[in-house]
Amino acid sequence: MPRPLVLALCLAAIGCAHKAALRAELEPLRFEAPPTPPAILTENHFSRDVPAALSEAELKTILAAPVFLEEQARVGVVPVASRYEPDPDLPTVAAPAALADALEQSGMFELSSEVSTDWPTDRGIRGLRELAARYRTEYLVFYRHRFVDQSYLNPWAWGYLTGVGAIFLPGQTMEAAGVLEATLFDVKTGTILFTVFERVRKESQETPWDADRKRMALKRKLLEDAASRLADQVVAKCRRLAAARPPPPAKEAISQL
């Protein structure tokens, strides 16, 4: 076979191979259903209220469920004393009132209310859930605080040796430290959505006279100043939970158009 003819056949074969290499093929379409979102938690799995009460399936169900704040819900603020108790001499009115007012003004709840624990009810979680049902509130904010204090002499106390220095010299340092706590409790499911803390500390140099009154005034001032900051933390957390609300079902979304 002549060499020019052989060369022409080789070039033609290479060209055919090149065309075959560039041939695009479409994969068949595969229609797959979107993944099913986890079920919303509606059941209280903690009703037995004993250690190790959850089964493995219940634990996985709770952890897989979306966490969000229901729309048009009601919330109550409850001062509680458990594990460590609030100072019985320190009024708790300021912080619960600030929390209730901040939640009311946030617009995320239909109504916010301070909750009176004087209504007859069992102690513990069951009693609190029954109390919430009386108030028709889907959520409760548990509030509590704890304060510790100490007093000691400072360098001004050397003036006490004069006999008259104790009248006007601030030779005693008073120090108080505390923590305010707020916890959002989902009454329907018995789950805790979040807990926030506001830690405070202050010291003051005082004369040794009327020490108990001055110590109480120091802690009361700390409590009043920290209440609004604790309320800001609670509102910020609630906003994040409100933003996490799942989209409405398709039928409901169409009906709202």
Image (tube, grey):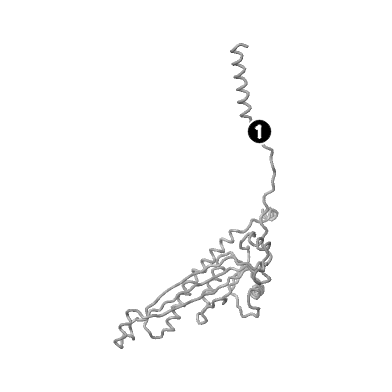
Q: Position of residue 198 (x, y in %)?
A: 49, 69
Q: Position of residue 121 (x, y in %)?
A: 65, 79
Quadrant placement of the N terminus? top right
Q: Quadrant of residue 80?
A: bottom right
Q: Position of residue 3 (x, y in %)?
A: 59, 12
Tell whether 178 sits left or right of 83.
Answer: left
Q: Nearer the viewer, residue 187 or 54?
A: 54
Q: Quadrant of residue 183?
A: bottom right
Decide: few, some or many residues near mark 1? Use Cα within 10 Å; few <14, some 14-19, many ≥20. few
Residue found 30% across the figure and 86% down from its top? 161
Q: Residue furthest bottom?
A: 163
Residue found 53% across the figure and 63% down from its top? 236
Image position of 88 with respect to 63: above or below: below
Q: Helix, strand or loop at disc 1?
A: loop
Q: Position of residue 28 (x, y in %)?
A: 69, 38
Tell whether 86 sits left or right of 40.
Answer: left
Image position of 163 with respect to 240: above or below: below
Q: Nearer the viewer, residue 126 or 218?
A: 126
Residue found 58% across the figure and 74% down from its top? 78
Q: Residue furthest left?
A: 162
Tell whether 177 sits left or right of 38.
Answer: left
Pointer 1: what residue? 25
Q: Nearer the viewer, residue 244 or 71?
A: 244
Total numbered badges shown on the rendered structure: 1
Image position of 151 with respect to 137: above or below: below
Q: Residue furthest front?
A: 1
Indicate the amino acid at tag 1: Glu
